[in-house]
Image (cartoon, grey):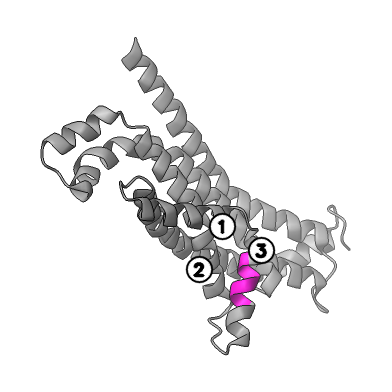
Amino acid sequence: MSGILSLRAWGKVWSYRTTFALGLFNTVRTAVFAILIALVLGIIFGLMATSGKKILRAVSRVYVEVIQNTPILLQTCFLYYALAFSNHSIGIIMTGIIALGVYTGAYMAEVIRAGIEAIPKGQFEAAAAQGFNYIEKMYYIILPQSIKIILPPMVNQVVNLIKNTSCLYIIGGADLISLTYSFVTGENTGGAYAPAYLISGFLFFIICYPLSRTASAWEISLKQREARLND
């Protein structure tokens, strides 16, 4: 029944369409809250990385290097099982939200750092000459200019986060991949492998593709704007 052309297999998938809808809902819910955490951490550590204080830059560097150089699966398992064995389990979905938020936050911090450092030094000097402190300088002068640089790679990180929700599978999550696996191996639903995974992939695609195209369009627009300014 697992063949891609099997009408029985496709019928089985359609009969249990609410399972895939639930998986999609949990994936989107996890992603949305994880993105909020990632943005907050990215802004905080991105600003720390560009501050004039060595201790803040060092803390930001340690966070980024540790998170970026260890697998998201390892971080997810560590968070879930460390809390479970300490009798402080927060549940699979919440574990995924925190793990994905912290993981993506490190990449967001690098994106924000790079965006801030791309602004000409003269802008920093002009803001300092006006008597702005660091927060005012960033809020009124630097960040508004860096938004157009930051947005395209930031959207790409959002896409990566959505795809990384599949890591919840390793801790028995209720995300789209986890529920798809449960469906194809279930006693009453098992067997429709090809249709089930195709549907799962299609649902990821219809979320991620528009975001990827948006990021590409922003990047092209930015390059065209810079080319016009340099002419």
Residue 15 is situated, as x and y percent measured from the top left of the image, at 71, 70
Residue at figure coordinates x 55%, y 66% from the top left: 99
Which residue does the numbered mark 3 point to in the structure image? 73
Is residue 201 visible in the rendered image? The answer is: yes
Which mark is drawn over residue 98?
Answer: 2
What predominant SS class does the magenta segment belong to? Answer: helix
Quadrant in which the C terminus appears: top left
Q: Earlier in the sequence, mark 1 or mark 2?
A: 1
Q: Is residue 78 magenta?
A: yes
Image label count: 3
Residue at figure coordinates x 81%, y 78% from the top left: 188
Q: Residue furthest bottom?
A: 87
Disc 2 is placed on an element classified as helix
Measured along the vertical axis of the image, is residue 20 above or below residue 94? above
Residue 128 shown left or right of residue 38 in the figure:
left
Q: Decide: marks 3, 2 in contact (CB < 8 A)? A: no
Is residue 18 visible in the rendered image? The answer is: no
**Magenta stretch in the rendered image:** 75-80
Which mark is drawn over residue 66?
Answer: 1
Which mark is drawn over residue 223?
Answer: none
